[in-house]
Amino acid sequence: MLMAPPLSPPDRLAEAEQTIAAGRYRRAGDLLRAAADSENRVAALRKIGGYFAHLGQPASAESCFRRALLIAPSDTGALYDLASACIGLGKIDEAEALFDRVIAAAPTDWDAWANRSTLRRATPEANHIAELKATLAQHGQTSDARIALGYALAKEQEDLGKYDAALTALSEAARSRKAQLSYRVTDDVETMKQLADAFSVENLATAPQARTEPGPVFILGMPRSGSTLVDRILSSHPEIESAGEVQDFALSMMEHVKGAKSKAELIALSAQADAAAIGETYLRRMAERGHDGFAIDKTPLNFLYIGLIAKALPNARIVHVRRGAMDNGYAMYKTLFRMGYPFSYDLADIGHYMVAAERLMLHWHTALPGRIIRIDYERLIADQEFESRKLLAAIGLDWNPDCLKFHANASPVTTASAVQVREPIHDRSVGLWRRYEPQLQPLARILKQNDIALADGA
């Protein structure tokens, strides 16, 4: 019998892209490894590394980027890629040195400037403020420079306690970022209302009873609410592993909900879809990633899908992380997310989005009594062991002291909190918004008008 000829490296990459889209992650990994083994082109190795990163395999991504640099030691793109991989793997000193090299060789790589400033707390002895100011003065007429340098400058000024200067830089950068986007927060507010209407109390009355066997653990809530900290604490337990932020639930839904011509129609169809089939597809995707049993899916905006998650996955644990509203809102405002969260660049948009999210979460709690485990960031910070024990008990697991040593967890982190969660627990961010209380009034007013407490316990 004739054997099919082996795939060429470009064909392997093309098939890998198709298999990733189909959720066949094991096959994609095999194709990528085979392609990497026979590849010696820098651009191709960077592309393969990017796919590995997308699959949640940062060590394989790192290997590709290092090979690219062996071929072209001065390639700034490969240097940047390797720095990003090092952050996820906890190699912070190396990441900083790599970003230094990128900036020295390609001083207009603005993302390198922004990312470098997130790697450690600036001190009077070690900071980039003078360099940032000089570069901003020279290149600030370019919006991308104004954004990245502004966020970096704001972060380092805040580290040094120069709060007025920090917020001035941040506000200017956020305005520039918002101006790049065509976004209306009213669209997201309407979407959340449509979700509550479609997944009504009556609709969710058909959801199966929660089951106690091991299953997915969804950690969700607003971005920058402390979800990564909760992920690290839980995944330090020997019976829990983390898949990180993946889009597999939304992708599983899209596999089974066809023909929608608008977002409103998609929501309506999803509420009537075969939820069990969606759940099976999701579990298959997670198994393709190598995860089963208690496996964390830490995608904050899965809070939009709680109704469908409850119908599709009766053995899922749904952990809702909450944080004081003003601290949470400010934390989002000062983060340059790049992809996603377009509401985060304007204080009023943040306020309207948070109000809509709070109403949707109230609906989920009402429609699914006892199904959602709530954890408060401030209480976790104040008494980590007590809150961690309570959370594990709610999930159905015995206590393990490794959960107290989450900062020693060696597993990769790819979120905006990648550096912070490698430190022991601290309360530096609790109440930080009060440093900027006058300037944050557009956010505070919207929260007050909608009876949302500004701070935890307030």
Image (cartoon, grey):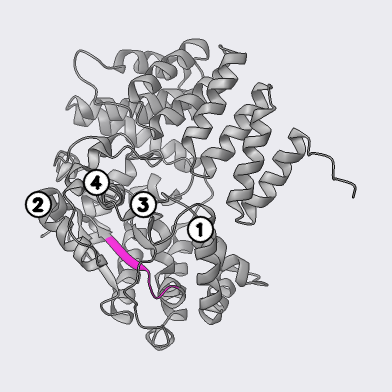
Residue 140 picture location, percent across and down: 45, 22
The number of numbered badges drawn on the structure is: 4
Alpha-carbon neighbours of circle 2 within 10 Å: few (<14), some, or many (≥20)? few
Q: CA distance from mark 4 to mark 2?
A: 29 Å
What residue sits right under mark 1 in the picture? Answer: 287
As shown in the figure, which amino acid type bears the numbered disc 2?
Asp
Q: Which of the two discs, 3 and 2, labels the residue nearer the N terminus? A: 3
Q: Which of the two discs, 1 and 3, labels the residue nearer the N terminus? A: 3
Q: CA distance from mark 4 to mark 3?
A: 38 Å
Q: Quadrant of residue 398?
A: bottom left
The answer to whether mark 4 and mark 3 are in CB contact below 8 A is no
Q: Quadrant of residue 388?
A: bottom left
- Residue 315 magenta-highlighted: yes
Q: Which mark is residue 383?
A: 2
Q: Give the camera-side residue of 52 and 396.
A: 396
Q: Is residue 101 left or right of residue 394?
A: right
Residue with the most extreme right position: 2
Provide the secondary structure element on which disc 2 rests: loop
What residue sits right under mark 4 in the picture? Answer: 440
The region drawn magenta spans 313-320
Q: Is residue 341 left or right of residue 75?
A: left
As shown in the figure, which amino acid type bears the numbered disc 1?
Ala
Q: Nearer the viewer, mark 3 or mark 2?
A: 3
Provide the secondary structure element on which disc 3 rests: strand
Q: Which mark is residue 241?
A: 3
The answer to whether mark 1 and mark 2 are in CB contact below 8 A is no
